[in-house]
Structures are given as structure tokens and as C-alpha cells.
Image (cartoon, grey):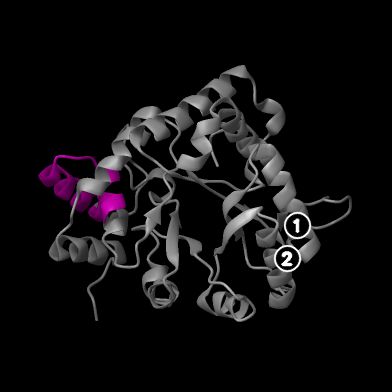
């Protein structure tokens, strides 16, 4: 989402293009294999930048997994339309073709519906998904920001399983642990993709003193720092290790574009939090004891 360095594609100059390529190169060198996109990220510019890297390195495509999303329509698309969500078959097909062109690839590994459309017709979506799969344009399908009931409603019309649900999960947002989202992932073998795993940055290793945290947040990051010191890593790695511990197989979507931060984040893979430390973090994040 951030590789363009802006949400305005007209602002993607040579420097921003170099920075985007450097971020992608750093991730590849560090061993990342899943790359998360959406058609709305910088109005398609993020997909375009990744497409440039793929075009310059044709052998790279088979070594990575590309996920992208559709379904969000901004105001005045087309003229006079409100901001809305659109899971119509026509829009899904059109969006997929546009993403394929920007990414300069023949297929998308995981295609996701971005935010729940309350006018969702599961049968219409199933027809569009089946057509895209039969044409070789998409290998697997998933959703993003879906409640368990929305997942079940869509899955009821599909002849194949949804493979991911991308939701906001981090130590500052614990809802998915208790609202049935992760329970359903366990039940249906759906992989949860965690967006904003560092809570937009405040849970990560700080570059400067943090002065705008609440008392609950301060207590949590102090505990994180203590556990991080014991493991010889930074706070970022502890925040990610907390997610990786869950048996549903949470995959954090690392959002940094700084090569050093991208490289550091992979160290979370080597951390095995004890159950005691995991629950210490969970209770601190709740700000109150367990029932």
C-alpha cells in the first residue's frame, strides 16, 4: 500500500519509483514471498510499480505470491457516484483485468474482495470467480475485512474454499480473537492475513521517544520492550511474534517501505513466545485481567 510514497499517482516521480523498487528488492532479498496489493492503493500506482519489477525480472513471477483486492469505488467513479463498495460481477471482472495489466502478469495468485458490500449477491460473485478461475486469471480467492457471517454467506455459493480473510489484527486491536473471525479461520482452514500488524506504527520499534500514548498503551509497550530485550530483538519483532503464535497461522502484512525495517521484521520468525509471555501481552493489551 505504501510503496508509491503517495496516494496520488501523479506524484510518483523518479525518486519515488526508485524507493519503491528498493523496498521490493529488500523484501525479496530478505525472503518475503507474499506481496499484498489492492486496486485502490495509489489508484493503481502500487500495482504498476510492482509490475515494473516483474517485467524486469521475468523469472521472479513463479517464486512469489501476488495477492490483490477489488470492490472499493471512490466518489465520482463514474461521475456523480458516491463512495461505495461494488461486488457486481461486471466490476469484479473489469477490476481483475485492470490489475493484471498493471501488474504485468497473466494471473493473480489470491484475489480478494476488499470490504463487505451490503448488496453482495453470493451467486453473482461465484459466477464471476468461476469465470476468472476458468480463464486462468486467478488461482485462489479470498476476502478482506469480512465478518464470519459474511464469509459464510459467500462460501455457501462457492464450489471451492475461500483461502484468506485479511483483517486488522494487532495488540491494539484484539477483536478478531473473540468475535469468531479466527475461530472460523481455524474451522475452515482460512489463513488470516493481518493488516496493520503494528497498529499503524505505534507498536513497532520506535525511532524517537513516544509522547502521545495512553496509559494502557504505555504499559503495553513497556512490557513489549522488556520481552524484546530478553529475546535480543526490537519491539517490532515481538508485535509480529505475538501474531505468529496463534494456531490459525496469522500472516502479518509488513507495511514498512524502509529496507532496514523490512529486513529486521523477518527476525520475528525465529521468536517462539512462551504461553506465559503471550498471555502477559494479551492481558496488557486488554488493559484488564481475564474473566
Residue nearer the viewer, 82 or 88: 88
Q: Secondary structure at mark 2?
A: helix
Residue, disc 2: 128
- If you read the primary sequence from the N terminus, does the residue marked by circle 2 or circle 1 appear first? 1
Can residue 250 be seen by looking at this rendering? yes
User: Which portion, as a residue range, is magenta?
Assistant: 219-241
**Local crowd size for mark 1, using a 10 Å CA cut-off: few (<14), some (14–19), many (≥20):** some
Can residue 216 be seen by looking at this rendering? no
Quadrant assignment for the C terminus: bottom left
Residue beneath the point at 41% across and 44% down: 254
Magenta span includes 126: no
* Badge 2 vs badge 1, beta-carbon distance below 8 Å: yes
Pinpoint residue 243: horizontal percent, then vertical percent. 32, 58
Residue beneath the point at 56% across and 63% down: 142
Magenta span includes 223: yes
Relative vertical location of residue 9 with respect to residue 200 in this rendering, above or below = above
The image's mark for residue 93 is 1
Residue beneath the point at 73% across and 70% down: 127
Quadrant assignment for the N terminus: top right
Residue nearer the viewer, 79 or 45: 45
Residue 67 appears left or right of 99: left
Relative vertical location of residue 229 with respect to residue 161 in this rendering, above or below = above
Amino acid at each position: 500500500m505504501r510503496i508509491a510514497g503517495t496516494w496520488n499517482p501523479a506524484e510518483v516521480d523518479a525518486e519515488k519509483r526508485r524507493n519503491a523498487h528498493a523496498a521490493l528488492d529488500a523484501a525479496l532479498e530478505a525472503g518475503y514471498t507474499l506481496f499484498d496489493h489492492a486496486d485502490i492503493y495509489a489508484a493503481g500506482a502500487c500495482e504498476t510499480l510492482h509490475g515494473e519489477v516483474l517485467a524486469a525480472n521475468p523469472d521472479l513471477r513463479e517464486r512469489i505470491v501476488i495477492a490483490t483486492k477489488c470492490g472499493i469505488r471512490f466518489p465520482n467513479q463514474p461521475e456523480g457516484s458516491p463512495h461505495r463498495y461494488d461486488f457486481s460481477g461486471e466490476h469484479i471482472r473489469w477490476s481483475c483485468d485492470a490489475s493484471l495489466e498493471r501488474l504485468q502478469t497473466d494471473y493473480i495468485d489470491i484475489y480478494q474482495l476488499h470490504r463487505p458490500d451490503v448488496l453482495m449477491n453470493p451467486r453473482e460473485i461465484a459466477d464471476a470467480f468461476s469465470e476468472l478461475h476458468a480463464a486462468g486469471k486467478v488461482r485462489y480467492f479470498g476476502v478482506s475485512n469480512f465478518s464470519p457471517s459474511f464469509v459464510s454467506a459467500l462460501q455457501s455459493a462457492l464450489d471451492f474454499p475461500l483461502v484468506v480473510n485479511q483483517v486488522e489484527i494487532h495488540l491494539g486491536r484484539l477483536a478478531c480473537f473473540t468475535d469468531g473471525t479466527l475461530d472460523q479461520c481455524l474451522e475452515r482452514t482460512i489463513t488470516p492475513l493481518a493488516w496493520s500488524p503494528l497498529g499503524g506504527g505505534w507498536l513497532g520499534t520506535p525511532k524517537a521517544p513516544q509522547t502521545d500514548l495512553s496509559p494502557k498503551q504505555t504499559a503495553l509497550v513497556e512490557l513489549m520492550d522488556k520481552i524484546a530485550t530478553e529475546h535480543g530483538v526490537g519491539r517490532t519483532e515481538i508485535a509480529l511474534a505475538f501474531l505468529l503464535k496463534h494456531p490459525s497461522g496469522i500472516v502479518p502484512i509488513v507495511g514498512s517501505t524502509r529496507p532496514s525495517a523490512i529486513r529486521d521484521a523477518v527476525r520475528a520468525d525465529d521468536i517462539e513466545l512462551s504461553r506465559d509471555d503471550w498471555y502477559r501481552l494479551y492481558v496488557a493489551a486488554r488493559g484488564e485481567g481475564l474473566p
